[in-house]
Image (spheres, rainbow, N blue to C red):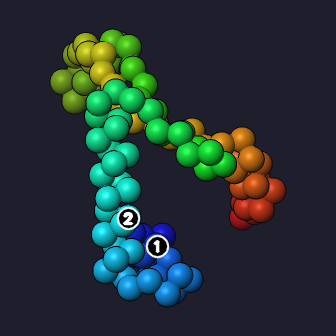
Amino acid sequence: MTKAEIVAQIAGKTGVEKAAVQTTIEAFMTSIKTTLESGNNVYLRGFGSFTVKKRAEKTGRNISKNTTIIIPAHFIPYFKPAKTFSEKIKENVKVS
């Protein structure tokens, strides 16, 4: 599902204009990005948590040059779904 599809679905369910829904979703995403960039976490009860994780420095391989490289420590965004949300997915999604 794309952002445009989410906007259309919310607009259809709520009766709010697509432009207003688009603006709201953009503001929501910007708020989450800004919060994570400042090093803080976002907790959405019943949905999940957006957090920042630190990856430790590690050794990697450049297979095209057959050399060893050092990958520096860095931070990455991470999403952890809420327990109830994960359980619903496990119950309802069938793997084919």
Quadrant location of residue 69? top left
- Front-lying residue, 2 or 19: 19
Q: Secondary structure at mark 2?
A: helix
Task: Tell me what residue is drawn at x 76 percent, y 55 percent.
Answer: 88
Q: Earlier in the sequence, mark 2 or mark 1?
A: 1
Along the viewing direction, whichever of 70 and 53 lies nearer the viewer: 53
Q: Position of residue 63 (x, y in %)?
A: 27, 26
As helix, strand or loop, the secondary structure at mark 1 comes to: helix
Residue 2 in the figure: left or right of residue 64:
right
Q: Residue at x 73, y 61 (%)?
A: 93
* Residue situated in front as seen by the camera: 33 or 69: 33
The amino acid pointed to by label 1 is Ile
Q: CA distance from mark 2 to mark 1?
A: 9 Å
Is residue 60 positioned above or below 19 on the image?
A: above
Label of residue 20 in the image? none
User: Which of 71 and 41 lies nearest the eye of the viewer?
Assistant: 41
Which amino acid type is marked by label 2?
Ile
In percent of width and height, residue 2 lies at 42, 70
Residue at 33% of width from left, 48% of height from top?
31
Q: Residue at x 23, y 20 (%)?
A: 66
Q: Position of residue 7 (x, y in %)?
A: 42, 76
Q: Residue furthest right?
A: 91
In the rendered image, is residue 60 in sight? yes
Residue placed under numbered mark 1 in the picture? 6
Residue 25: which disc? Answer: 2
